[in-house]
Amino acid sequence: LKKNILRFAPSPTGYLHLGNVRTAIFNFLQAKKNNGEFILRLDDTDRERSTQHYIDQIKYDLEWLGICWDRVEQQSKRLDRYKDILNSMIKDENVYECFETTIDLDLKRKKQLNSGQPPVYDRQSLKLSDRDKAELRKKVSSYFRFYLSGNKVSWKDKIAGDVEVQTNAVSDPILIKANGQFLYTIASVIDDIDFKVSEVVRGVDHLTNTAVQIEIFKTLVEYSPEFAHHSLIVNSSGENFSKRANSLSIKELRENGVEPGAVCSVLVNLGNGKRMEVKNDLLAFAEDFDLKAFNTSPTKFNTEDLYSISRVALSKLDNV
Ligand code: GLU
């Protein structure tokens, strides 16, 4: 991949908050630092939870922060493409048809947990004969899973360093649900391939996903993009900010008088060990932005700080 292409991929199922905006900023700066391209990708395959209101609001928030995208892509408009790829994966036997209902799967999980086993999908559906399957198809809608190798997946992470994930401890991921909904796991890989994404920056909560997705990349193309997994921000009692309930939305922060320059300055500098500099222009951080300065351990942050930093940001605006 020659060009630097990065993307921010929110699901339009809620407002942006400090947790996902940090991811947006990292991807944006990493793209702009190298004169690359920044894509806003809307992960809206969940038609029930995704709304136009949240799409509009996400765009508004990003613009307010100074995060501008070179183009927008929307997963719900690419379903035919996903279908084609899924069909080729079924043909190549990288993907298999399953028939359990959500209730069946829940029960299995509980049984496994009760007997002290890891709740990994037992691949029962793989044992079905063609006749069994034909019978089952008459009764239930099937769903499809990707067949994981069970091998160790390793990669050189631009923040986390050398990462290894053993995929035999992971359930074969569901790619399409019985109701026909494509899941993020496959849609994201197909998009990253089609849009020639060269680097993916996201939270450490995605490490296992990455291992799974690297296996999918390898079955579809010869390469996978580079990955960087940043820490998650936590409040003073150690609770994760990316959980919406624990974090104020960007919308609320704005309404409370927080300056965009304060949000950006804080999120760019949080966890990199450097003295914070307040700048009102997000792009001014691009040149010195360095993923290597960050790490994966939880990064503490107190939302109250945004108010004092807003005053600094404002005073700098006054001086211009
Ligand atoms: N929609 C996914 C999320 O919000 C995107 C993750 C990714 O960057 O691949 O978690």
Image (cartoon, grey):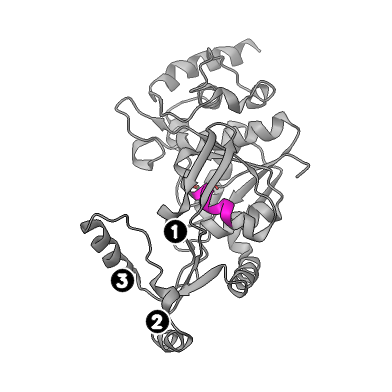
What amino acid is labelled 1 in the image?
A: Arg
Could you tell me if residue 64 is visible in this image? no
Q: What type of secondary structure mainly makes up the magenta span? A: helix
Residue 49, numbered circle: 1
Q: Report helix, strand or loop for mark 1.
A: loop
**Residue 70 in view here:** yes
Label 3 residue SS = helix
Residue extending furthest toward the top? 319
User: What whole-number distance in Å separates the C-alpha atoms at marks 2 and 1?
Assistant: 24 Å
Range shown magenta: 209-215
User: Where does the image place residue 39, in percent across and percent down from the top left?
Assistant: 66, 45
Residue appearing at x 62%, y 71% in the figure: 92
* For residue 207, side relative to residue 85 (left or right): left
Residue located at (73% from left, 39% from top): 4
- Residue type (three-letter) at the residue carrying disc 3: Asp
The correct choice, above or below, for 42 with respect to 98 in the image is above
Q: Quadrant of the N terminus?
A: top right
Q: Crowdedness of circle 3 by 10 Å Cα count: few (<14), some, many (20+)?
A: few
Residue identified by numbered label 2:
140
Q: Tell which of 240 and 65 is nearer to you.
A: 240
Disc 2 on helix, strand or loop? Answer: loop
